[in-house]
Image (cartoon, grey):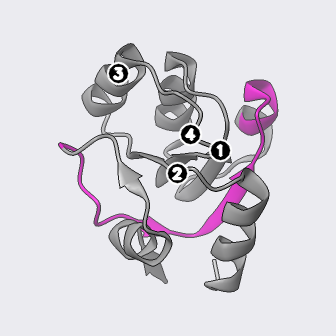
Amino acid sequence: MMKVNELMSALNLKLLTPNVSLTGEIKGGYASDLLSNVMGQAQPKMVWVTMQGHQNVAAVASLIGLAAVIVAGGAPVGEDTLAKAELNEVVIFSTSMPAFEVVGKIYSLGV
């Protein structure tokens, strides 16, 4: 099983929440920009790939107990989002890679 810090290294992701532990396990992945879809379909310990960077992303990730969020495509992430994420122990990464490429790489790593 892959850990969050291993995924960060493997994909060269930029960590946006440095005060949150990276030792959590990843048990799958989910990709969507529709928050209600993520709330209904994603499972705890999944990594979520999205282009959304507003603070509701941190709230949804915390509610579900996701392992991490990857904001793809170089999309901006608000400071309020990062503050909420750190408060709720949510790992948020960013990358300039398109979401399709991120998901493919995560899949190829066996997640």
Mark 3 highlights which residue? Answer: 84
In this rendering, the label closer to the viewer, 1 or 4:
1
Instruction: Look at the image and give the residue range highlighted in magenta.
Output: 19-38
Q: Contact (CB < 8 A) between labels 1 and 2?
A: yes
Sooner in the amino-acid sequence: mark 2 or mark 3: 3
Q: Which residue is mark 4?
A: 64
Magenta-span inclusion, residue 28: yes
Amino acid type, callout 3: Lys
CA–CA distance in space, label 4 to label 3: 15 Å
- Which residue, given by chain and number where applicable, does mark 1 sit on? 73
Q: Disc 1 versus disc 4: distance between alpha carbons?
A: 23 Å
Amino acid type, mark 1: Gly
* Residue sitting at x 48%, y 28%: 58
Mark 4 belongs to which amino acid? Ile
Report crowding for label 1: few under 14, some 14 to 19, many 20 or more residues within 10 A (C-alpha): some
> Looking at the image, which residue is at 59% across and 58% down?
46
Q: Which of marks 3 and 4 precedes in the sequence?
A: 4
Res. 107 mark: none
Query: Is the residue under label 1 in contact with that under label 3 (CB below 8 Å)?
Result: no
Instruction: Report the residue marked by disc 2.
Output: 95
7 displayed left or right of 27: left
Q: Which numbered disc, 3 or 1, marks the residue that appears first in the sequence?
A: 1
Q: Earlier in the sequence, mark 1 or mark 2?
A: 1
Percent coordinates x, y for residue 86 in the rendering: 27, 32
How far is mark 4 from mark 2, CA to CA?
Answer: 22 Å
Q: Between marks 1 and 2, how big is the CA–CA gap? A: 6 Å
The number of numbered discs placed on residues in the rendered structure image is 4
Expressed as whole percent of the image width and height from the top left, the position of residue 75 reads: 59, 33
At numbered mark 4, what does the secondary structure look like: helix, strand or loop?
Answer: helix
Label 3 crowd bin: few (<14), some (14–19), many (20+), radius 10 Å = some
Is disc 1 in contact with disc 4, using a CB cutoff of under 8 Å?
no
Kindly identify the amino acid type of the residue bearing the numbered disc 2: Thr
